[in-house]
Amino acid sequence: MSLNDVLTLVNKTFKPRRKVDFEDVGLHIELEPLTSLEEVKVTESVKDAEGAEYMEALRRNSLAFAIKQINDVNLDGETITYDSEGKKVTKSKFLYMQDYLGQWPSSILENLFGVFSNVVAETEDIITKKMKHEAFILSAPVAAEEPPKPGELRLVKEKDEPEDDAEVLRRRVEKEGTDAQARMDDTLAKAEEKKE
């Protein structure tokens, strides 16, 4: 299997396309989750916005990438060629859709963004369920200690005994700090005595 085959498999499995239809008006929209590069571009494009402006920009810019088809117009490509004042103009899909969606009512964008958010959540769920891996465990879980059986003798751990290596190290550092401070105090006291 080549890397292109793997990419095709990943896109097929983890980029579900969702259709949204406004049947009474004849509007059909298809959208997909963003790629990591698209997410970076969206994040960069909204970094200076604040408050309500931030949310509006996040919705519009995410949908600018997420929308892959409107009615019969395929928007899968990187660029869009359109007619402007009798001339053919080519613009990046993101910039074109950013401006184009800016002319749509905000309530439509809010609802489409809700569908987009749902697709992202669904994709994360699919990934979590399909992914199998060995987890690295930093520390073993502490087993609950059973109470002693009648007549059973157990060693009693002193309260001041360190429980693990980290505690031993912490205590050593504290002792070295205390010893160093005591030496400094002793040196200062001797210096004061010599002055007198």
Image (tube, helix red, strand yellow):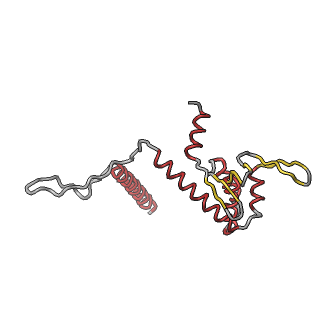
Q: Position of residue 129 (x, y in %)?
A: 46, 48
Location of the N terminus (image quadrant) = top right
> Which residue is farthest top?
1
Note whether 121 is above or below 107 in the view shown.
above
Q: Position of residue 158 (x, y in %)?
A: 22, 56
Q: Position of residue 111 (x, y in %)?
A: 64, 64
- Image side of residue 105 versus residue 116, left or right: right
- Image side of residue 18 versus residue 88, left or right: left
**Quadrant in which residue 61 is drawn:** bottom right
**Residue 54 visible at all:** no
**Residue 148 visible at all:** yes
The mark total stands at 0
- The residue drawn where x is 74% and y is 64% is 104
Q: Nearer the viewer, residue 32 or 169?
A: 32
- The residue drawn where x is 92% and y is 52% is 86
> Which residue is farthest left?
151
Q: Nearer the viewer, residue 59 or 54?
A: 59
> Which residue is farthest front?
24
**Quadrant in which residue 71 is drawn:** bottom right
Q: Position of residue 95 (x, y in %)?
A: 77, 53
- Image side of residue 72 versus residue 127, left or right: right
- The residue drawn where x is 50% and y is 52% is 125
Location of the C terminus (image quadrant) = bottom left
